Every structure is written in C-alpha cells, then in structure tokens.
Amino acid sequence: MTFRHPVFKWILLACLFGFQLLMTGCWDRREIEERTSVVGIAIDKSKEHPSHLLVTVQIPIPIKIAGASGGRAGGGKQAVRVMSSEGKTVVEAFQNLQKRLNQELFYGHTRVIAIGEAAAREGVNHIFDPFRRDPQIRRLLWPLIVKGEARDLLKAGPNLEQIPIVYVMTLIENGAKSGRIPDMNLGKFYIDLTSKTRDPYLNYVEVKDDDIRWEGVAVFRGVRMVGVLPGQDTWQMLRIRERKSGGNITFPYQGNPSQLITINTEFVKSRNEISYVDGHVVSKTHISLEGDLLEKTFGSNLFKEEEIAKMEKDAEKYLEKEAKVVIAKLQNQYRSDILGLGSKIRSFQPKIWEKLDWKEDFPKAEIQITYDMKIRNTGMEMR
C-alpha cells in the first residue's frame, strides 16, 4: 500500500511523532520509595550566623509508624526524624540538608510551614518566595508563626497522633471548621501578602516542651510581623472580617465582676455602611449573633423575659467594648488593616477609594462596631 498524495505522508509523520511523545511520558519518573517525604518545615534565624536562615524538617520513618509492617511500630517522636541545616537562603539551606540524605527530599506531603517570630519580624517575603515557585508545595497547607523558635514545633511530641505534625494540622483544621481559629492557608496568605487593600495575618502558636497551644494571630504590616492579637481579640476580628462565630464569651452580669455569664456565639449576619466625612472614612458595621447560655455563677429567674433581655444587653456591651480595644490596637499600635476594610472600600465605594492613601488613612478612619445578641436557649435550671 502506498501513499502518493502528500497529505497522507504528513498524517503518517504526525502519527509517528505522536507515538514517540506517548512512549516518553514516564522518562523522568521517580518511585515514591526513592523519595524522603517532608511533612513539616520550620524556618528560623540562625543564632551562629545572624545573616543565615536555619531550616528544619520533620521526616516520617514509615517502619516506626503504628500499623507499619515489620520492625517495631510506634508513633510520636520515635516515628519521625527532625533535621536542620543552615544557608544564606532557604534554597541553599535545603541543598545543604540534601547532602546529608540518601534520597531526594519531597515536599508534596508537607502540611505545615512554621516561621520563627524573630524571622517573621524581619520580613517573610524572601522566606516564602521559593515555596511560591515550587509546584510541589500545596496552597492548602498551614503557614504558622511560632513564638520563639519554629523548630521547637517540629521537636514537640503531643503523642495524640502517630506523626506529631499531624496533630498541629488537625488542631488548626478543626478550629477553622468551628469558626474559632482563622482559616488562613498558604494560598490565602499569598493573596493578602500582595494585596494593596488589606494587610496579612497568620495563626500564632506557642510551644512549651510537648504542649502546643494556639495563642491568636500574628499581625503583619506589609511583609513584616508587627505584633500579636491574643485569642479573644482574634475572635473579634473573625466576626468583623470573616463573618465567623468566634469562641465563647464570658462577661459580668449587670457590671458585677463576681456574677459571670458564659455564652457561645453563632454568627447570623452583618451589614456595613461606609462614608467619607470631613476628609476621613467612617465605617459602621452591625453584627447579629445568636447563642446559648452555657454557664452562670449566680442565681436568677430565667423564666422572666426581662432577665434574658438584661443578659443580652450585657453581652452586646461586652462585645462592643472588646471591639473598640481591638480596633485601637490595629489602628494606633500596629497600623495594620487585617480587618480588610480597605478591600470593602475599594469594592463597594471606588470613588472614595480614589481619594485615599490607605496606609496613611487607615489609622485616621472612624470604625464603629455594634452588636445584636439573641439568647436562644438557657438550658436546664437547678433549684
């Protein structure tokens, strides 16, 4: 059979070329057994060489994980190896670490990137730059700021998970699902880090021996960490910016510090009004919450509607007072708009946005937060 028409010759050549491409599809494959998986990364300033970075990784040892076949199974600290190496840059530190391993490091299973507070306060742009360029790094992993040294997070062994870093991951994940901890993953942090309308923040944790504790959020101004919002203040930020429930609130009944009430919170809705008055932004946000009475330390007749109304008013006053404290910190102390107010102005009031230099105008803005609290259930009473 012959192909005299030139078109058939070109079709034949195209098919042969296509077959060659298909046959070379696995030329650069690397078996999973030939890779060393990294589940957690920590980056600190080097103490010996202040201009260098100290990179630490947590590597699972499969044969020591409970349920593994062969060897002595276990978990916790015994199931992982923690290794560190220094370098002038993050990539150089990883290269120096690679020299001590017989297999190639693989970052596709990395779940947490922890940055030491000292390094974060000097700026994180150069730290995250290589992770932004590496296709192995997932955008859904959790970046964290650690009080003190970040490598302490990888050395801790809570013993509640087979692999210690999985405990950290689930701590943040479950808190984010319940609305108590910000859902700030790596992809969202990249967006905030490059935004001109809001400042970024990251979850902030403290490590004491084997105890790991979420302590709030690290506040950034641009690429530098400038301070910390503790847990209660973070919950206020979540209600204002993220429209999340936050945690429980405990407040005095009718101003008496010996009579305390605890209520959980559930976000219902919010509305925001923005105007430009006498050369500065005026932002008014009204937030509606619902909740259940969890505890009270005094006797009262909860069958009376006026008693419930008093509790609701006390809760509203408490929340509004706490909101003022948070806003004062962000405007005066940190000068950082992690509330995302600038994004709202740019999106819904573009004419106002054109008049602003937001870095300078944010501290001058008038931000008002009001609450409406409804108690749905008071629970069972004991007489």
Image (cartoon, rainbow, N blue to C red):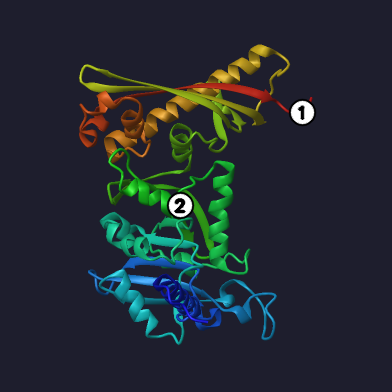
Q: Can residue 58 be seen in this view?
A: yes
User: Residue 44, percent across and down?
Assistant: 34, 66
User: Residue 152, percent across and down?
Assistant: 44, 66
Which residue is tagged 2? 185
Name which residue type carries label 1.
Met
Which circle, 1 or 2, is nearer the viewer?
2
Task: Identify which residue is drawn at 56% across, 52% down.
Answer: 173
Q: Nearer the viewer, residue 298 or 123?
A: 123
Which residue is tagged 1? 380
Q: Is residue 91 left or right of residue 356?
A: right
Q: Nearer the viewer, residue 4 or 365?
A: 4
Q: Nearer the viewer, residue 197 or 85?
A: 197
- Taking 146 as reference, is 156 above or below it? below
Tag 1's secondary structure? loop
Q: Which of 280 and 140 is in front in this view?
A: 140
Q: Quarter of the image holding residue 338?
A: top left
